[in-house]
Amino acid sequence: MRSQADDFVESLYGKESEPASAPTAHVDTEKKTLPDPSAPLVWCAPVAKHRGKWQAGVEIALIVALFPIIIFGEMMLGARTTLALSVAVVACAVVLFMFLFDTRHPSPRELVVIATLVALAVAGRSMFFMLPQFKPMAALIIIAGVSLGQETGFIVGSLSALVSNMFFGQGPWTPWQMLAFGLIGFVAGALHQAHLVSAKRIPLSIFGFLSIFLIYGLIMNSASLLMYSSEITPAALAMFYISGAPMDLVHALSTVLFLFVLARPFLEKMERLKVKYGLV
């Protein structure tokens, strides 16, 4: 006779339950397979589980705190503080990296991916050395932030600026570039995690264009005023912004171009690496 439990199971699943003694196929839950290349990609959010709001607040506070440190150093102590300021920015990146370790527990494979992204950004900047401001570095930093998260975006951006300046020349502009490129990667990852910037060509290209003017240009033009001008006035700041606008425009358009060309293949490759090796 059929019991009430059998009727319930049949109504729930639409069929009778299997006997308890029936053999079941073994499912390997640990096996990772690559996604179907023909299927549209579903971008995995690089946010770790149980991520506290206070951690994101501390990260933002650490980055914002760099502004008065660098401005005070450049205004009061001059170019001799370049090394100390660079170390301060790198220390901030290291602190953020510790948060990344605490929240994600990244594997050595992810560290290799981060180092590879930094090397690609440096190589991309060196490859186009003959074209001022026409560089793919900002595009690669944005891709790193979108794919691997805001902490990784900041690390890739700041370290790419520091390492590439070993070829292009270190100076009082180095900590400013580290901060500018680091913030571009950080903001790109944060906006993507907040679902304000999607991982598609057009939204990323728009963000890349605006980030050069609103983040990189804002920081570097302010730095130029502090480094090269004896008068710090609104008129002098406006003059630096106007004189730097053509170069910022070239930088922004090149970032749009490289994002439009590289974003899709790089993000696809990063997503498959994340799925295959469980990077995030």
Image (cartoon, rainbow, N blue to C red):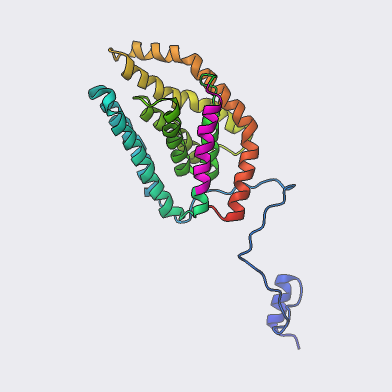
Residue at 47% over, 43% down: 152
Residue at 52% over, 28% down: 125
Q: Nearer the viewer, residue 138 or 170?
A: 170
For residue 65, side relative to residue 164 (left or right):
left
Residue at 49% over, 43% down: 115
For residue 3, side relative to residue 216 (left or right):
right
Looking at the rendering, in which quadrant would you find the N terminus?
bottom right
The picture places residue 132, in percent across and down from the top left corner, at: 51, 19
For residue 254, side relative to residue 223 (left or right):
right
Q: Is residue 250 visible?
A: yes
Q: Extreme left residue here?
A: 76
Residue stretch in magenta: 112-129
Q: Extreme bottom residue here?
A: 1
The picture places residue 83, in percent across and down from the top left corner, at: 31, 32
Q: Nearer the viewer, residue 112 or 233?
A: 112
> From the viewer's perspective, is residue 57 above or below residue 127?
below
Q: Is residue 74 magenta?
A: no
Q: Nearer the viewer, residue 162 or 8?
A: 162
Residue at 56% over, 55% down: 278
The picture places residue 222, in percent across and down from the top left corner, at: 37, 21
Considering the whole magenta stretch, tell me its main secondary structure: helix
> From the viewer's perspective, is residue 191 above or below residue 230?
below
